[in-house]
Amino acid sequence: MSRLLFAALASLDGYMADEDGNFDWAAPDAEEHQFVNDLQRDIGLHLYGRRMYEVLVAWETMELEGAPDVIADFARIWRAADKVVYSSSLKDTSSERTRIERTFDPVAVRRLKDEDGPDMLIGGPTLAAKAFEAGIVDEVHLFLAPVIVGSGLRALPATIRLDLELTAERRFGNGVIYLGYRLVR
């Protein structure tokens, strides 16, 4: 059975982007980036909303010659994974191994989870909120940056109660704290 993971880089007060849409304060250093790479290395399917896909698709065509090893490694990981983008407005994809679905269907995702395939990652808090509401997320991986932004795009849904069990934690040299949780059902 596959697991559905949600991972987010967030401010200490729980936002993935500030009220202006900026998230430059969440840029990982090499140590944190390597940890993210290792976390995502075996993910076979990425599920994205349009906005998250438009941010991450840069990894598809990024010039890797001379890039730090950790950057080239993440690009290889991202390019190797299959991707589904949920969007009613996106006409075409800009990456290989990518298809568009017009609506998020949690029943279809649950069927994918029931198959004996690779784990899946859901990216973007708006799309992830639908998966949390449907009760299909298995793990939450938060990278909390040492910044408070006050408002913006919340990393986690505000209207859902989730009981979690802490499974991992780590402090990085840049002040970011990683917290890994399993959802308690």
Image (cartoon, helix red, strand yellow):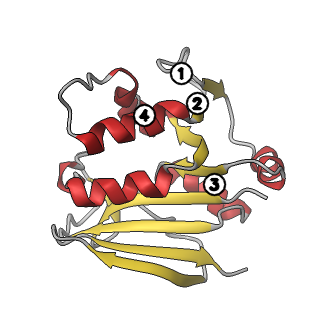
Whether pointer 3 and pointer 4 mark residues with C-beta atoms closer than 8 Å, the reply is no
- What amino acid type should be assigned to the residue bearing mark 3? Lys
Secondary structure of the residue carrying numbered label 4 = helix
Could you tell me residue 8's position as x and y percent?
A: 41, 58
Between 42 and 55, the residue placed more toward the observer is 42
- Report how far apart the C-alphas of labels 3 and 4 lie in the structure: 28 Å
For disc 1, the marked residue is: 90
Name which residue type carries label 1.
Leu
Q: Marks 1 and 3, Cα distance to the nearest angstrom? A: 19 Å
Quadrant (top left, top right, bottom left, bottom right) of the N terminus: bottom right
Which of disc 2 and disc 4 is earlier in sequence?
Answer: 4
Q: Position of residue 95 (x, y in %)?
A: 49, 21
Task: Please tell me whether mark 4 or mark 2 is closer to you in this view.
Answer: 4
> Residue 177 at x, y = what percent?
29, 74
Q: Earlier in the sequence, mark 2 or mark 3?
A: 2
Q: Are marks 4 and 2 in contact (CB under 8 Å)?
A: no
Q: CA distance from mark 1 to mark 2?
A: 6 Å
Report crowding for label 1: few under 14, some 14 to 19, many 20 or more residues within 10 A (C-alpha): some
N-terminal label among 1 and 3: 1
**Residue on which the image places disc 4:** 76
Taking the spot 28% from the left edge, 40% from the top edge, the residue there is: 71
Q: Which residue is mark 3?
A: 130
Could you say which quadrant of the image residue 87 lies in? top right
User: How far, Cα to Cα, is label 2 from label 3?
Assistant: 14 Å
Task: Say if mark 1 contacts mark 2, CB within 8 Å.
Answer: yes
Residue depicted at 32% across the width and 62% down the height: 10
Q: Residue at x 28, y 45 (%)?
A: 70
* Kind of residue indicated by mark 4: Arg
